[in-house]
Amino acid sequence: MTAEARQAGPNGIAEQSFDVPENPTVVSSRREFLGGALAVSSLALSGLREAAVAQPAPQPASAPPKIGEISSSGGRLRAVITIKNADRMMPGDSGAFERKTMVRYFEGKDASGNVVWPPQTPAGMVPPPLPGPTLRAQVGDQVEITFLNHVRVDEFAGSLDKAEEGDPLGCDGSKDGVTGKDLYPQEAGDRAPVCFHGSSTANIHWHGTHVTPDGLGDNVLLHLRPNPQVTEELIQKDIEEIFREGPPTTWLSLRPEWRERQKALLKEHDRTAIWKGVRGALPPELHLWPATEKLIERGLWPQYQIGAFPYCFKLTRFGDTNQDGKPYAMGQCPGTHWYHAHKHGSTATNVLNGMVGVFIIEGAEYDGALRNIDPRLKQTEKVLIVQNFGEAPNLLSRRVPNLLWVNGQLRPTITMQPGEVQLWRFVNASIRAVNTLLGFAPKNGAAPEIRQIAQDGVQFSFDNYKNQPHLRGSAAGIPPLNTFAPGNRVDLLVKAPLQKDSYEFRVTDTTIALTESLLTLRVEGDPISPAMAFPSDTERSRYLPFPSFLTDIDPSEIKIWRKLDFGWEPNRTTPGLNTALPIPGAKFMINDKQFSGGRYDQTMVLGDKEEWTLTNSTATIAHPFHIHVNPFQVVEIYDPNASDQLYKPGKNFVWHDVIAIPPARLDANGSLLLDPKTGKALDPGYVKIRHPFVDFAGSYVLHCHMLAHEDRGMMQLIRVIRGDQGVPSHQEDVTVPHH
Amino acid sequence: MARVDIKRVLVGAVEKVIFDPSTVQALQGEAIIWRNLDPKASHRLTLKGKDEDFWFDRLLAPFVEGQIPDVTMPGIRFFAPGSFPYVCTEHDDGEGEIEIT
C-alpha cells in the first residue's frame, strides 16, 4: 500500500485496524473484534493509533460497523474496485472465528486514490471477512469504475481456478485425502460448464440498475480473468480517456490502445497457460484470443478480457433521451441497490467470499423527498448488508453457512432515542437465505414500529405505504411475505417506542425454518426532540411523490405471456444428494433445461410488456427469481403450503427485481406431492409478474438467486432485440470450454 | 493454512526438494493444496504407501519466474483427525506430513 493510500479518507475509514491474532488461542467473539475496530477508528482520528492497536476496547453490544463509502461528485461516480485475495478468519457455526481461509474480496479506492475499504490490517493480523465498499451516486450520474482482477489463483485451497488446466470435468474440485475418492464434482454428478468453476474469473452485476446489459454496462457475460500485472498505473491514461469520452456503443469505438493491450494479454495467456502440468501446452481449441477475435469481427463485444475492465454507464434519469434522441420509457429508480460478482460458475463462491457491496442511488423522488419531510431521516440512515460467509459452497466445502452477518457483524445493536424514526436500508447478499421479516418482538407491552417504504430499490406508492402489503402480518395475524430473499432489498422506517429497552429484530430463514434475531434495537437516552413521526399515511400530498413510470402496467398492454418452471429432475423429492437417482446431485433447471451458454432461452422485443407465470416444482426451497436490467410488478403469489394461499392485490402492484417463488405442495408426511404419471410436482407454487422490456436491447440473464443453483444450472440466457433490427445485440455468450 | 510450497533449496552443497511447511496443519474438511515453486522439476504427490496417481493423475509443471505457479487440483480434504505422511512419486528426497486437528 502506498503512503498516500494510508492517509485517512474523508471519514477516517482507511485508518481502521482489526485486532485479530494470527493464531488465536482463545477464539474471541465477533463483537469483540469489531468493537475493537471501532475503538481503533475513533482513536486513530485523534492520533492515538499505536495505543489503540495495543489496547482494543471490546464493547458488550456494538453498533454495526459503517462500511466505507465512495460517493459521486460532479455527476461522476469514480472509483477503482480491485479483486484481491488474502487470508480471513472464517466463522464456524457458533460465530466464533475458527479457521484462516484464503478468500477473494473487493478493495475500493475513491477518486483521490485513497483506499476507502476494507480497513487496513496491521502486520500479523488476520481480519474477519467483510463486504465490499458502499457506493453512492445520484440518478443522472455517470458511473466510472476501473475494475481490476488481481487474484493470485495459485494461493487458493478451497476453490481453485485451475479447471482449465486439464481437469477432464472442468470444475472446481475436491478429493477425500484418505480414500482418494473424488468428492466434488463427481459426488454431485456435475459437469462443466454447469458446475462451480473458474472461481477467480469475475465480473460485476450492477443489481437494480436500469442500464444497458452490453459493453461497459451491466455486462454479466464478461469473463474478466485475473492478472496482477495489469496495474492501475499501466492503464490509467486509457481509462481517463474512456471515461472522458463516455460509454462507447461498440468495441471498435473504444480507444485503440485499450483494444491492443487486451489483444496482447489474451495472446500471452494462450501462449503461457498451463495444460495438464505443462506450461504453454494449452490446446488451440481452448485459446481465448481466436474466440475473441471472431466476436470482434462480427462487430460484437469480446467476452474474455484480462486484468482490467472500464465500467462506464449512465444512471438514466426519466425524461432524458437515449442515444437515438428518444426519451427513456423508464428511469433509474432511486433507492437501495447493490453490486456483486456474477461470472457463471463462480458466482456462489465469490459472493460467499464477500464480493458484494451496497450501491445507494439517490434521487429527488426518494431521498430528496424524505429529507424534505425530516432532514434527520437522511442524517441517521443505516445501510445494512446481510451475508453468509464461507470459502466455497457446501458441495465443495461441506459446510453450510447459516449465520446471517450484518455489515460483517453478528447480531449488532443499533441505538435510537425514544420516539426517534430512522431509515434502515437492508440488502440481502446471502447466497441462500430466503427470509421473512418478522419485525420486532414486543417487550413489556411495547415494540418498535416498522413501515416498509421501498422494495428492491423501488419506492412504495402512497397506497402501498398505507396498506403495507408485505408486512400486513403485523396487523392481521397473517405471516408476512418472504420478501427478503437473496438479492432483495427492503427499506424500512423504524420508530423507536418511548419505553427504553432492547428489542430483537427477527427474521425467519425459511429454507432451514430458523427464526433468529438479526439485530437488536436499543432504545436509550432522552426522547427525541423535536418529536418525530412516520410520513403521513392519510394525506397523499404530504407523502413522497411517485414517479409516473412506476404506475401499474395496464393488462391490456400485455401481448406476450410466458411460463417458466423452476424445477429439478422427475421423481426427486428433496434437494440433497440422493444416490438412488441416476445423478445424485439435484439438477436445478428452468423448463427442464440447465443453463447453456450460447443458447437463448427467451427472446423479447424491445418496448414490449409481458406477463410471466413462474412456477416452482421443487420441495421446501423458495427459489428467488431474478432478472437483470428491468424491474417487474408482482401481481399474484400462490403458496400451496400456506393457510393464506393467494396474494392477489388487484392493483397497486409492488415492483421487485427478485421474488421468491413458493415451493410445491407437500403431503401430510412432509414429502413432495408427485404426479405418479410424470414424477413431477402435482401442485407447484407460483408467482405472476408483469414486466416492461424497455430502453435497452441486449443479452443478459434471469436466474435463481440462490447462487449455487445459478452456477449449477438454474439460469437462462435471454435477449431483448430491437424490432427494427436483425442484429440482436453487441454481446453473445461464446464460452470457451473449461473457462 | 492449508497450502504447501514445493521448493528447491541448497543443503550444504547439495540441492534438495523440500515441502514448506514440512508439516501442514488443517482442520477436518479443510482443503489442502500444493504449489510447485521448483524451477527445475515436475512433482506429483501421493499419500505414503499409495499408488502414484492416488491423488493426482498429472505432474505439477516446473515454476517459471514471473508466471503463476502450477497448483494441485482438486483440493485434498481429510474428514478424520490424525497424521498422514506423503511423498513425491518422482523424487525420494523426503516426505511431508499432514496433521488434521
Image: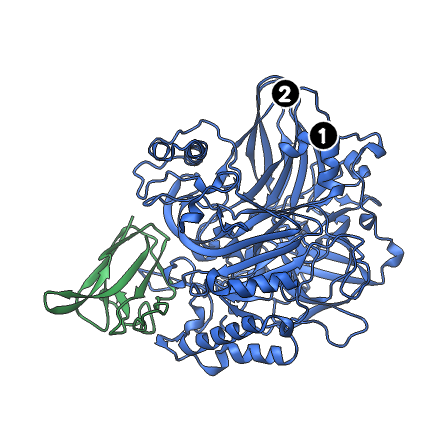
- For badge 1, the amino acid type reads Asp
Identify the residue under disc 1.
A374
* Residue A131 pos. (x, y %): 51, 47
Q: Quadrant of residue A127?
A: top left
Please, is residue A15 above or below residue A299 in the view? above
Residue A588 at least partly seen: no
Indicate the chain coloured green by its letter: B
The label nearer to you, 2 versus 1, is: 1
Please, is residue A129 above or below residue A190 in the view? above
Using the numbered discs, state the Cα–Cα distance from disc 2 to disc 1 in whole angstroms. Answer: 17 Å
Decide if residue A171 is on the left or right side of residue A341. Answer: left
Dot 1 alpha-carbon crowd within 10 angstroms: few under 14, some 14 to 19, many 20 or more: some
The one nearer the camera, A683 or A623, is A623
Q: Secondary structure at mark 2?
A: loop
Identify the residue under disc 2.
A418
What colour has chain A? Answer: blue
* Residue A95 pos. (x, y %): 44, 39
- For badge 2, the amino acid type reads Pro
* Residue A638 pos. (x, y %): 74, 48
Residue A573 at least partly seen: yes
